[in-house]
Amino acid sequence: MKNILKNLIAPAGSFLHQLTVSFIIGITTLILVASVVTSWLASNRTESDLIRQGHQITENLARQSTLALLYREGENAKDAARGALAFPDVQNVYIYDTAFQLILHEGKNFEKQIIYFSPLMNSSALILDKKTHWRFRAPVYSQIDPDNEFVVKGGNADPELLGYVDVVLSKDTLVNTTTSIFVVNSIIFFSLAAVLLLVLRFMAKRITQPLNKLSTTMYNAESSVENAYADEDGPQEAKVIAHAFNQMIRAINERDRELKNQNITLEKRVKDRTMELAEARDRAIEASKTKSRFLANMSHELRTPLNAIIGYSELLMEDAIDKNNESSYSDLNKVHNAGVHLLSLINNILDLSKIEAGKIDLYLEAFAVSTMIADVQSVIEPLARKNNNSFQIDCPESIGSMCSDETKIRQSLLNLISNACKFTKNGEVSLVVRPHKLGRHEGISFRVSDQGIGMTENQVNNLFREFTQADSSTTREYGGTGLGLAISKHFCEMMGGYIRVESVKGEGSVFTMFLPRVATIEGATPAKEDDQKPDADEKTEDKTPMSASGEIQ
Amino acid sequence: MHLKTNIKRPGVAFVCSWLLLVLSQAPINVSHAAEQRIAVIYPVVKKPYSTVFERIIEGIAAEAKTDIARYGLKGVDEEQGAAIQEWLSDQQSDVIVVLGRRGIEAVRDLKLTIPSVFGGVLYVADTTLANSAGISLTPDPKQLFGQLKRLSPGTKRIFVVYNPARYQWLINLAKPAAAALGITLVAKAVEGLRDSARIHRDILREAKRRTDSVWLLQDSSIIGSNTILPMILKESWNKKLIVFSSNPSDVPRGILFSFYADNKALGENLAKLALSRLDANQKPRTFILPLTGALSAINLRTASHLGLHIPFEEQRKFGLVFPRK
């Protein structure tokens, strides 16, 4: 019941529904209460009227029964008793003497039971109140002195009790009246309620119609706000809501228009900028290519005279040795060394230019890794000793061979190890070579660690940029062009590998070069990140390999 | 229950008769009392009953020939006795006339130092007012019987049922009055309504047309206006029996005739009686006198039914004639 009521007046229902339900509940309650109360009041009124009537009939009969009781002859009161019976609902009349001996009975049913009760003088009493009838009793007294100024009380004139008169009054009228009042009231009230409900529903519909229309308009506005304006009519409150809604829709439409215009403008701008950028990019690429071409050409042009200088300086040095001219030899040696260094710089620039110009190629060949490592050791050891460093190599014999560009691998390794030796003094530089999985492919890791100056995170991030060392102070102190690491990184990526750097400022750095055992042209295909991880806690850095566009020759 | 036809206090009857005689021949006493001051205590009632007392007081004043002191009793008050005492001492009256039931009840318990007279009531018990005389509103039997004799000269017996506690004094007066007219008064004392009903039925059975008649006293304790009276009226009508009453209000209902008080004359008589009480030769006694000089009322329809022919000239002598034309 509670749930039904709850559902009926659920706030989710429409206004009209809720109003109708509220009206029905209210009016029904009102009707029931009104019917019951009216019937109850009418019943009470009827009951008191009937009781009063019963008292009157009994008292009248008592007055008329005096003679019968004086003579103790019921016949004298028969007419009066029949007169009382003529009243509606009077069922029985009894006349008793003072000893409750029956003098007269008139009526339908005779009750033998006698109620021994004597009411007060001058009054009747309701002596029995049964479900079906009442029984009234009035005492019959001899004449009482009139209460006037001409009669003095006294003189054995006290009223004498002669007997009693009982009148039995049926409750049929009461029951019928109560029932008919309730039925008639209910019919009238329900009829009125039906009319009232119709009127109220009509009014409610009239009141809620603008709200419904507003609600529909708002619902439709979900899909399109354009022209989703509400009619501003109906009750004042609905008008205010509709007006506010229309204001809002107008504002939204205005904003949409502005947004549309801005989008168009923006798209045009983006298009223009994209075109400009594409042109700039093309120009930049062309400029870079031009620069690379120029550098390549210039390097070639520079190397020719430089080779002549180095060659002739060597000849002159041999000649100085033959002639035992030490001072000339020393000067010629400096010239020779400067030439060699310059040639190295030019080669690096040439390599970088070729890389940028996409003109560097991989020369794949099978080679034993240990042999290559031994070559590297022979080159590095003098370099390590220079800064009083020890150089350790850990390369198992079973490491096997690779099919890759040996020259570029060696160059990259030499670059990493020479850097380690350069930035470490009186420390230890080590190279650890291990087989390592690179995605689905077999690979080898070359781990170069030092106890040098180390780098900050920011320095590590800029490490592989061309012409960049850790910072400018590093360049001043340790020399170098800053091209080595960039070239090594490009080489590794061309071969399908990458370089990872771990460094702690002041403690040293670890450069690990991961390379596939067999470098293929597919090496450009980026390996999956998870696959690339040697193990779970190894960090990766700059692990996106660049594409290798060179041809295998 | 038994009948009381014997007279319990023959002495009272004698005194009353003697007093009547004195009153009717007492001009000397009255003249002596002309300068005596009379106080009247009367009940204040609504109209039309107030007229009765006003007329009585008017008669008293007329007979007293001096200003009379009046004390109206407006209601029942516990302090009333003291107020009356104080008022009486202020007035310095010589005699009091007490009127109506309330008047009698108001002075009943007072220790009056001056003589008192009562009136305006039908009867009082002997013990109601000690040493007080009064005039009843009940018509004098002499007058009643005289009228009866005039209307029905053949009447030999008059039946009456009475409550001795109330009307023994009247019966004592009635018997000689009837005898004086050659009529036998058959007076039957009863104690209550039940006896009265039975006796009346017996009387109505026994009474004979033309020679017997029934006299009804104004006493609700034995004549119920709604019980016995209708029965008497019915039976007497059927038997064409003459029934007369001391109660004038019975005449319109079918009783042949009755008498009613001329209130002013009653007042005059009360004043005379009061002044006579000042006579030093009179011993203070309690007694009551019937109404004299009353006016008559007749029901011509009943008379006609009874076969009594009342000439027009005779009809004019009646104060009230029913049915009213």
Image (cartoon, coloured by chain):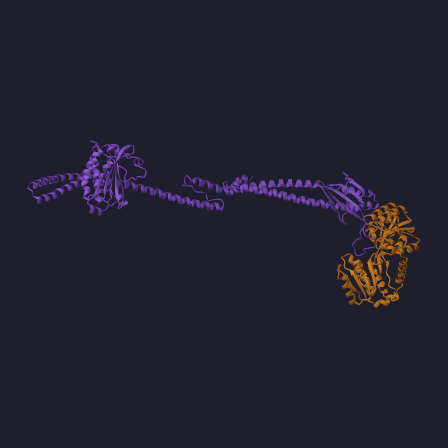
Chain colours: A purple, B orange
Residues B47 and A136: in front is A136
Instruction: Give how far across and how far down residue B140 sits, in percent.
Output: 87, 56
Residue at the spot x=87%, y=62% of the render? B285
Q: Quadrant of the N terminus of chain A?
A: top right
Q: Is residue A266 left or right of residue B196?
A: left
Instruction: Give how far across and how far down residue B94 sits, in percent.
Output: 82, 66
Above or below: residue B142 compared with residue B307 = below
Q: Quadrant of the C terminus of chain A?
A: top left
Instruction: Give how far across and how far down residue A344 sits, in percent.
Output: 16, 40
Residues A243 and A70: in front is A70
Q: Is residue B313 left or right of residue A110?
A: right
Residues A77 and A118: in front is A118
Q: Is residue A58 left or right of residue A382?
A: right
Residue at the spot x=64%, y=41% of the render? A182
- Dividing the picture into quadrants, the one containing residue B49 is bottom right
The reply to whether residue A90 is in sight is yes
Instruction: Give how far across and how far down residue A261 sits, in percent.
Output: 34, 43
Above or below: residue A238 compared with residue B18 = above
The reply to whether residue A283 is in sight is no
